[in-house]
Amino acid sequence: MRKRQIDTLKIFNHNVQEVKENEEYLVNFNCGGREIAINILLGSGFPNEKPKLIVSPILRHPWVNGTTGEIDNAPGILNYTIHSDLGRIVQAVGREFEKHPPKFVNEPTSTPQHHAPPAHQASRNGNVQEFGSDNRNAILSPSLESDQFGLRNLTTDELNRLNTDEDYLEEFITKLPFVQHQNDEMDQLLAGIESIAVENLARKEAVEERKSKVESLALEFKELGQQWETMNQRYQRKAEDFSPQHIKELLQIAVSTADGKSDDEAQRFLDGQSDVGTFLQNFIESRKLYTMRKAKEERLVQQLTALERAAF
């Protein structure tokens, strides 16, 4: 899942640079004609834990911490879940800075940094120029910041109403440009989530259909297997019934039966239980049958002996 999140970062954003594999990435954006960089830091708990985005140089923007440069108020960060797309989050931040270029807290250095600038910077002539608290306070002074909420244009009565009327305050906040933009971003994120959910549902139906088909084929295979087992058992019985050895045994039994029947006819005649005509007819028939069966038996024995000699 971590790799899939990193793949979305490369899909939805250009100029993605790998600083440290699976841990840190850098994405460049154009902000009012000047280039900014967003460092994406993926902790050990990502994607269960939200990523850390740090913009360099630091910008004056409601989404950005003015001291550290961390983007901690972007909708994608505030509403981050394990199902969020890292690439879409970074893309939304980049588009916000490109469409509404904010001012820089300080001049960017030659290479983007992850953290706030040091307390002193080198000037062009090589001298060290102190960057003390007075300069920093001047840069962060509200008087120099843009009136993002438009409070300067409001009358005293309107300001008092904002302070006392919650409904009026909520309506006022809802109409703020950057709040509307955040709502638009939220709608885009929700639409993306809905699209993914619909796609997952569509895949679920396909998976269920294939699963049902596999179960049907498995049942058919089981039935065919049972049929094969039954037919195989019948084949084995027939093979045994018609095997040369079994036929030989049956012929031997038949020969013995015919021989015994002729002996029984002779004994009946000797005992006076049959006349000459009856005796001759029955005796001749039984001896004829005996002779035929005996001949078949001897011929089969010869054939089997020949096969054994031929190594069959």
Image (tube, rainbow, N blue to C red):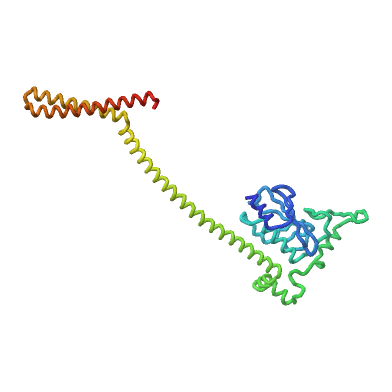
Which image quadrant is residue 236 in?
Answer: top left
In the rendered image of this protein, does residue 196 appear above or below residue 312? Answer: below
Q: Is residue 122 left or right of residue 171?
A: right
Which image quadrant is residue 307 in?
Answer: top left
Q: Is residue 293 left or right of residue 80?
A: left
Q: Nearer the viewer, residue 128 or 225?
A: 225
**How many numbered tags mark residues here?**
0
Q: Residue at x 30, y 25 (%)?
A: 301
Image spot of residue 159 (x, y percent): 72, 74
Q: Nearer the viewer, residue 14 or 6?
A: 14
Position of the C terminus, as image quadrant, is top left
Q: Residue at x 68, y 69 (%)?
A: 180
Image spot of residue 247 (x, y percent): 29, 30
Q: Is residue 244 left or right of residue 30?
A: left
Q: Nearer the viewer, residue 254 or 291?
A: 291
Q: Is residue 144 left or right of residue 49?
A: right
Q: Nearer the viewer, residue 214 or 72?
A: 214
Q: Residue at x 33, y 38 (%)?
A: 234
Which image quadrant is residue 305 in?
Answer: top left
Image spot of residue 127 (x, y percent): 92, 54
In the rendered image of this protein, does residue 260 appear above or below residue 12? Answer: above
Image spot of residue 82 (x, y percent): 62, 54
Q: Residue at the far top: name it.
A: 270
